[in-house]
């Protein structure tokens, strides 16, 4: 955990230097803000019930006048050399129905600004793992011409998405091993899409605000800077995710 917290401190310092005025991003369990309480999720791996919720958010840059959609990328890395079966969150792997996106914050939490107001539609999807790494992508949007497509004041922290990972197939017949293995999850980027005729254009955010990463089952991540996990993108999967909200 010492290496993990060192990485966290370094990321906060970097954020203050690099993201002032240009927007930044946060990731945490259960709420926005990148607060210490949302850093790690511990689970006893003893039930198939329940959902684990990651919340991605962003601190708005200047000139967000008509945000219509978000595109997000999360990169994950496990402690072992192979990707855990429990984290096989796509068709053909152990838990293909255990990953979902949710963009409705009308029932809470209420810490940050709910821009979507329950109107966004879209999805999250997982790439195939490569070694001990995996990438999750998402795209979600308000319908064209929706009255909720408005401006966001610079500096406001805004809810982007919930990444829900359920506990199905954790125990019992057909269970998937690897729930107890530590995983580092990094929110690599959020793109704020605006209509093509918007002079300010879209905004690409990648600098951390409070903290752009979270962990599963603690660690220790000896020698691993959790804030800089990387996994190669696959454009075909990205296109497939986009197609889900058209």
Image (spheres, rainbow, N blue to C red):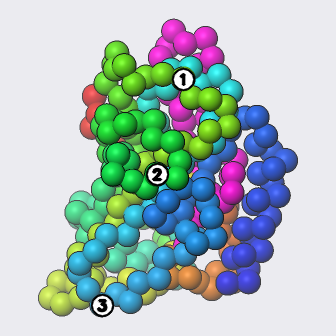
Which comes before the other along the chain, label 3 or label 1?
A: 3
Image disc number at residue 110: 2
Identify which residue is drawn at 65% across, 22% down: 63
Comparing marks 3 and 2, which lies closer to the viewer? 2
- Answer with the quarter of the image where residue 27 lies: bottom right
Magenta-drawn stretch contains 53: no
Identify which residue, 154 or 198, lies in the foreground.
154
Callout 2–callout 1 Cβ contact below 8 Å: no
Query: Could you give the CA–CA distance between mark 3 and mark 2, rounded to whole angstroms?
Result: 30 Å
- Answer with the quarter of the image where residue 169 lies: bottom left
User: How busy is the neighbourhood of tag 3: few (under 14 within 10 Å), some, or many (20 plus)?
Assistant: few
Q: Give the residue at mark 1.
A: 151
Q: Secondary structure at mark 1?
A: loop
Q: Please indicate whether residue 158 sits to the left or right of residue 234 in the image.
A: right
How far from the left and from the top, in percent, is residue 94?
Answer: 26, 73
Identify which residue is drawn at 76% across, 34% down: 21
User: How busy is the neighbourhood of tag 2: few (under 14 within 10 Å), some, or many (20 plus)?
Assistant: few
User: How busy is the neighbourhood of tag 1: few (under 14 within 10 Å), some, or many (20 plus)?
Assistant: few
Numbered range of the magenta stretch: 188-215
Q: Give the residue at mark 3.
A: 46
Q: Is residue 192 above or below residue 237?
A: above
Query: Could you give the CA–CA distance between mark 2 and mark 1, rounded to whole angstroms?
Result: 19 Å
Which comes before the other along the chain, label 3 or label 2?
A: 3
Comparing marks 3 and 1, which lies closer to the viewer? 1
Identify which residue is drawn at 48% across, 76% down: 41
Q: Is residue 166 above or below residue 1?
A: above
């Amino acid at each position: 955990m010492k290496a993990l917290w060192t990485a966290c401190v370094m990321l906060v310092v970097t954020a203050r230097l690099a993201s002032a005025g240009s927007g930044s991003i946060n990731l945490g369990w259960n709420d926005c803000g990148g607060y210490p309480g949302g850093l790690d999720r511990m689970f006893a791996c003893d039930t198939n019930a329940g959902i684990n919720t990651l919340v991605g958010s962003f601190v708005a840059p200047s000139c967000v006048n008509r945000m219509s959609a978000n595109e997000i990328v999360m990169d994950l890395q496990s402690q072992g050399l192979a990707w855990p079966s429990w984290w096989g969150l796509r068709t053909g792997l152990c838990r293909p129905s255990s990953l979902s996106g949710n963009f409705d914050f009308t029932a809470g939490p209420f810490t940050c600004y709910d821009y979507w107001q329950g109107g966004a539609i879209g999805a999250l999807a997982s790439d195939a793992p490569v070694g001990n790494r995996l990438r999750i992508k998402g795209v979600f949007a308000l319908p064209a011409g929706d009255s909720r497509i408005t401006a966001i004041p610079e500096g406001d922290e805004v809810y982007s998405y919930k990444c829900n990972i359920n506990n199905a197939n954790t125990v019992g017949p057909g269970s998937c091993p690897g729930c107890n293995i530590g995983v580092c999850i990094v929110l690599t980027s959020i793109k704020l899409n605006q209509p093509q005729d918007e002079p300010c254009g879209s905004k690409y955010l990648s600098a951390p605000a409070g903290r752009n990463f979270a962990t599963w089952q603690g660690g220790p991540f000896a020698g691993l800077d959790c804030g800089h996990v990387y996994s190669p993108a696959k454009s075909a999967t990205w296109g497939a995710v986009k197609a889900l909200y058209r």
